[in-house]
Amino acid sequence: MVKAFLLLFITWALTACQNPDVAKQRLLKPDQQNFQAAHQLSTQLPTQLPKAVANNAVAYLQVDGQDQFYSFNGLLAGKTHQDITNQAWVWRHGEWQALSVPSAQPRVLAATAVSAAGAVYLMGGYTVAADHSEKSVPNVWRIDAVTDQWLALPPMPTPVDDTVALVYQDRFIYLISGWHDVANVELVQVFDTQSQTWQQATPLPLPPVFGHAGGIVDNKILVCDGVKLVVAGEQRNFLPSPACAVGTIDANDHHLIDWQVIEHHSGVAHYRMAASSHKKSQIHFFGGSNNPYNYDGIGYNGQPSKASNVLRIYDFNQQQWTLSDSDFAASMDHRAALSTWYGLVIMGGMKDPQQVTNEIKYLK
């Protein structure tokens, strides 16, 4: 075996010397190549979730060079309040493994997850009772990426669900707007993973929303769409909010954000898109629905919601949008997309007609 390995290495080295492009290709990180080449470098990537689930919190990181994908909570295929789950899964070493979830973590929808400083953080969500009453939960957990141990952290000052969570400097987690019990909040709550403390940042200048989407590149945040609450007398209406804002985090004070409203991608808001940063200067938004809906996929207007397959790309350098129909099946009910070496990854959600799926998409 040793001789065979040495022979293989010598053959590759001679080839690389004769063709410098070969050596360069081997040294490049996957995110510097196209999707197909990066995909070939990974021998084991998940193609399906262990169960069909929508509105699940997702996260991704690498441990010792190994990919780890996470899925938490969400809605199972039955789509009733009894189908809300607190199950958690991690993909590592080529298989899905169930995580042991603390009893203090309830079955919730619209939780959010991120990875920062080598760990995964799970935050918020809302419970649904048999009478359909909902309650935002303040829970914050740190899940160790090696031992899988859950550590309860200081709860959110204002519990929110259906928020956008973004990580700055691999340390600060920003929770932007979202739903709190009976209404949306304009708050931008910041959690410091080092000091494990909460502070407030400059509020979002748009109408407060839930089910919006966003991403971050360096110190620039982009947030779009979602659902706003409009109260007229005793009538409470949940309406699309076609609006986008870019926020620049101050280099000297991460609590200060210079928000600027920018041109909308299409004039039509989409609810629960999958979004993340991509290609160093872009935020990609995929899917969602133009008809805001309750957790079962039926719109607040009583009409079944249809999913989108449109990819909406904002480039910070060019300061413009590009929209295109993707080659992927339309889907909605996402918490976020995952930015990985292999492109953007979308896990679970709903596809038409309001069908919970276990599909995993890899977008270039």
Image (cartoon, grey):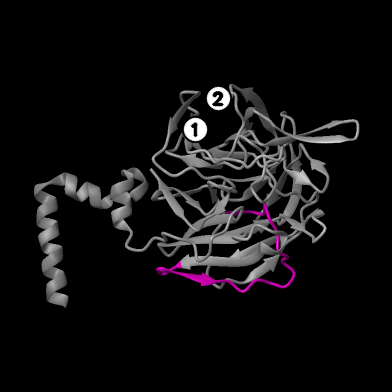
Closer-to-camera residue (350/315)? 350
Q: Which residue is painted at 62% across and 39% down in the image?
A: 271
Numbered badge on residue 150: none
Q: Which residue is mark 1?
A: 312
Residue drawn at (70%, 34%) of the image:
256
Indicate whether residue 16 is drawn in magenta: no
Q: Looking at the picture, which amino acid does disc 2 mark?
A: Ser
Task: Judge by depth and name the residue closer to the eye, 129 or 155.
Answer: 129
| First-in-chain label (2 vs 1) | 2
Instruction: Name the kind of residue labelled 1 in the image.
Output: Arg
Q: Mark 2 near mark 1, Cβ–Cβ under 8 Å?
A: yes
Q: What residue sits 57% from the left and 46% below the top?
A: 169
Residue under label 2, please give it.
266
Judge whether 216 appears above or below 322 on screen.
below
Q: Residues within 10 Å of mark 1 (few under 14, many from 20)?
A: many
SS majority, magenta: loop
Q: Is residue 110 magenta?
A: yes
Residue located at (64% from left, 28% from top): 242
The magenta region covers: 92-114
In percent of width and height, residue 133 lies at 82, 54
Horizontally, is 253 left or right of 9 in the view? right
Location of residue 98 by image quarter: bottom right
Q: Position of residue 99 (x, y in %)?
A: 58, 71
- Location of the C terminus (image quadrant): top left
**Quick check: can you spot residue 116?**
no
Q: Where does the image place residue 280, in percent across and percent down from the top left? A: 44, 38
